[in-house]
Structure formats: structure tokens, C-alpha cells
Amino acid sequence: MLGGMGLAGAVVGAQPLSAADYAGPNVHEFVAEMTRDYGFAGEQLLALFAQAERKQVILDAISRPAERVKPWKEYRPIFITDSRIARGVDFWRENHEALARAEGEYGVPPEVIVAIIGVETFYGRNTGNYRVIDALSTLGFDYPPRQPFFRQQLKEFLLLAREEQVDPLALKGSYAGAMGLPQFMPSSFRAYAVDFDGDGHIDIWNNPTDAIGSAASYFKQHGWVAGEPVVAPAEVSGERYEEGLTVGLEPLKNAAELRELGWKTRQPMPDETAVTAFRLEGAEGDEYWLGLPNFYVITRYNRSVMYAMAVHQLAQQLAEARGAQ
């Protein structure tokens, strides 16, 4: 029990500190902070870190030069596949009650939740094989470029393990510490995850109901508006349309400003609608799109226009496929 509230039964049989990867001054300083600020038991935290392992493969992965950014025509086929759609329809059918309830409570359509889980982990097939304690210790203590972020995530992880009464040595995730079917970082778990089946625990690793409710909660708290569209295809003309292209993800212009710059949509749009304007290199040439407020919400899950488009278009395909059945 850490701080009298239980972190892990598994830390009791820890290896001697001399054999540990994480027993140095940085770790002692971190443990002292957790003891002082959050009431953890220092000796038991040290015993936990004695069993954490530094993973060079994680440092290699996060330090690897970024791949060439794929154009949309190459990115889209990674996620919009027959197998991902077919498995998504199965996942929807298996979890239709939880998905319907999530839509009722949070306003997020089932196909959007299914698409998020499909893009993130192929409906739980690829949730990550690294112990979260190893990932976050490695990055929090041995990766200076992002040390503050990952140390904060390590704090959040220890807190969630205590709150949920789970063994921190047992939980697995990605090399960056993202967890479960929806791939929440520990801070997102503590802020947005919900016990959607009411069993007293939040389990986004093995319980699709909790994963569904948690993803819907995340969307709702980031501003998802029920019944509103996500994107609108656009046509551009004139010499100023490129001035409308959004730099970054924030919707800094509105529909009226875009119209003045030569952007036109098939559906009328209120002048004050905040929009993100972007161009994608599609299979048949350039595509122009206006991302609406719900599109921006998807980019809050993963800060990428192409990611948000993949989620949206997979959601459309899932809805169509389920309707066809």
C-alpha cells in the first residue's frame, strides 16, 4: 500500500536497489516530491522503481528522425481499409448498447467513437506491449528533451494506479505511455476517463464499455457539439484563396472571411462559423476542406489534420457499412 491507499502488491518483492536501473539521485528527488506532495510511502516507491527498467528501444524510437510526412493519398489507405471497417462493424455490434448510451450522455455518434478506437488500436488489437512504468521512467529520467512532460505523466500514472487500486507494474501501453483501447496518456485518463459500466473501476485496457465512455467523455469535454457536421468540402477560386489556409490547427478565421478569399462550400454556412481551412494531396489531385468546430475537437485527440480526416472518413464508412447490414 503506497501512502496507505494501495499501489501495488507486486512491489513488495523488489530487487535490491543496487540492481535497479532507477535508483539514482533523480529518482530519489522524484520520490521525495511524490512523498511530500501526494502522501506516497517513499520506501515503497523506491521498491517500485527498483523494478522499473530503462528501455533503450524506447529512447531509440522517440529519438528517431521523423518519417517523411506522407501525403493524404498515402496516409488515408493506412486507416481506411476493408479489414478495419469490417472489424469496426463487429465492434459496434458487440458494444451497441454502450455506444448508444454514450451518444445519449455525451452527444458523440457511435461511428466516431468506433473510428477513434479503430484508428488508435484496431479495436484493441494493438494497445502496446511496453510496461507503462518502464516507458514513463525511461522518458522521464533519460530523455532530457521532453523530461518535464514525461515526468508529469509518471506522476499522473502513479496517482491513477493508486486511485484505481491497480498494480503499476502490470499495466501496458505504447512506448510513449499511451494506454488502453483509446490510448489515453495518464493525465487524460485522470481528467476524462469514466467508469461507464459502474463497477467501481475504470478499465480502458480490457473493458470496451469504459473505453467507449471515456472517449466520448474526452470529446464532450473538448467541445463536441451533438448533431453538428465535422467538415465541408470546398472549392477555391481567385488569387487570394491560399491566404485562407490555416497555419496550425486553431480555427482562426470564420466562414465569411474564407468566402472573401475565394472559398466556396456547397452547403450554406453561417458567417461566424469558426473554420480550419486546409488542402490535402489526394489520389485525384488537391482537395480543399473546411474543418468545422467538431473537426477541431478531433484534432485535440491527436494534433494532426490528416489524423482527424482519417477518423472522420472511417466513421463515415463504418456508418455506411453498418447501415448496409
Image (cartoon, rainbow, N blue to C red):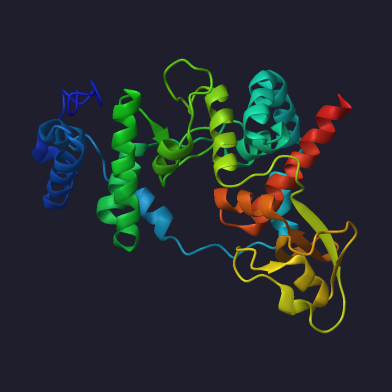
Residue 263 located left or right of residue 83: right
Residue 196 located left or right of residue 265: left
Is residue 169 visible in this depiction of the protein? no
Say which quarter of the image contains residue 115. Answer: top right
Q: Residue at the spot x=83%, y=32% of the render?
A: 321
Q: How many marks?
A: 0
Q: Quadrant of the N terminus?
A: top left
In the image, residue 6 lies at what x, y percent?
A: 24, 23
Q: Nearer the viewer, residue 37 or 205?
A: 37
- Vertical comparison of 105 with 302: above or below: above
Residue 313 located left or right of residue 246: right
In the image, residue 317 lies at what x, y percent?
A: 80, 39
User: In the image as oriented, which residue stretches furthest toward the bottom?
Assistant: 239
Is residue 187 visible in this depiction of the protein? yes
- Vertical comparison of 56 with 237: above or below: above
Q: Quadrant of the C terminus?
A: top right
In the image, residue 267 lies at what x, y percent?
A: 88, 56
Q: Nearer the viewer, residue 46 or 40?
A: 40
Q: Nearer the viewer, residue 172 or 289?
A: 289
Q: Residue at the spot x=18%, y=34% of the render?
A: 40
Q: Nearer the viewer, residue 70 or 294?
A: 294
User: In the image as oriented, which residue stretches furthest toward the top?
Assistant: 199
- Vertical comparison of 172 with 60: above or below: above
In the image, residue 32 lies at what x, y percent?
A: 13, 44
Q: Residue at the spot x=15%, y=30% of the render?
A: 44
User: In the image as oriented, which residue stretches furthest toward the right?
Assistant: 266
